[in-house]
Image (cartoon, rainbow, N blue to C red):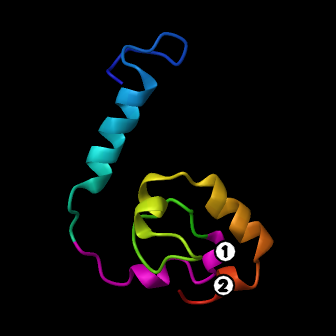
Amino acid sequence: MPLGTTFAAPAIAAEDAFDVMAFVNSQPRPHKAGLEADYPDRSKKPVDAGYPPFVGPFAPEQHRFGPWAPIQDWLRANPAASRATN
């Protein structure tokens, strides 16, 4: 971003790109029914999935905006708990 840039020659700073991403992710989205059935095995749900149910002792904001490494570490350390409803 913007069109035509590459990883090697970015047009904006990484921090600015993350700010844009956070803004887009914070905007309201239409409600879709049945999202809880998307990942019957919650251990396979992406840690950055921005909708509940969330797994682990982390705030919804952390699932949406990160950092995600602590969530991934927690999931590896608690494989049985990652399948429980939170």
Q: Which amino acid does label 1 sit on?
A: Ser
Query: Is 43 covered by the magenta stretch?
Result: yes
- Residue drawn at point x = 45 percent, y = 26 percent: 14
Which residue is at the front of the view, 45 or 73? 73
Q: Is the residue marked by circle 2 packed among few (<14), some (14-19), or many (20+) residues within 10 Å?
A: some
Query: Splitting the image into 4 quarters, where does residue 33 fall?
Result: bottom left
What's the magenta region? 31-44
Query: Splitting the image into 4 quarters, where does residue 79 fall?
Result: bottom right
Q: Are marks 2 and 1 in contact (CB under 8 Å)?
A: yes
Query: Splitting the image into 4 quarters, where does residue 41 fall?
Result: bottom right
What residue sits right under mark 2 in the picture?
A: 83
85 displayed left or right of 27:
right
Identify the secondary structure beneath mark 1. helix
Identify the secondary structure beneath mark 2. helix
Say which mark, if any, is on residue 25.
none
29 displayed left or right of 55:
left
Q: Is the residue marked by circle 1 packed among few (<14), some (14-19), or many (20+) residues within 10 Å?
A: some
Distance (Cα) linking label 2 and label 1: 6 Å
- The location of residue 80, given as percent across then percent down, is 75, 85
- Residue drawn at point x = 63 percent, y = 89 percent: 84
- Residue drawn at point x = 46 percent, y = 81 percent: 53
- The location of residue 43, given as percent across then percent down, is 66, 74
Image quadrant holding the N terminus, namely top left
What residue sits right under mark 1 in the picture?
A: 43
- The location of residue 15, given as percent across then percent down, is 41, 29
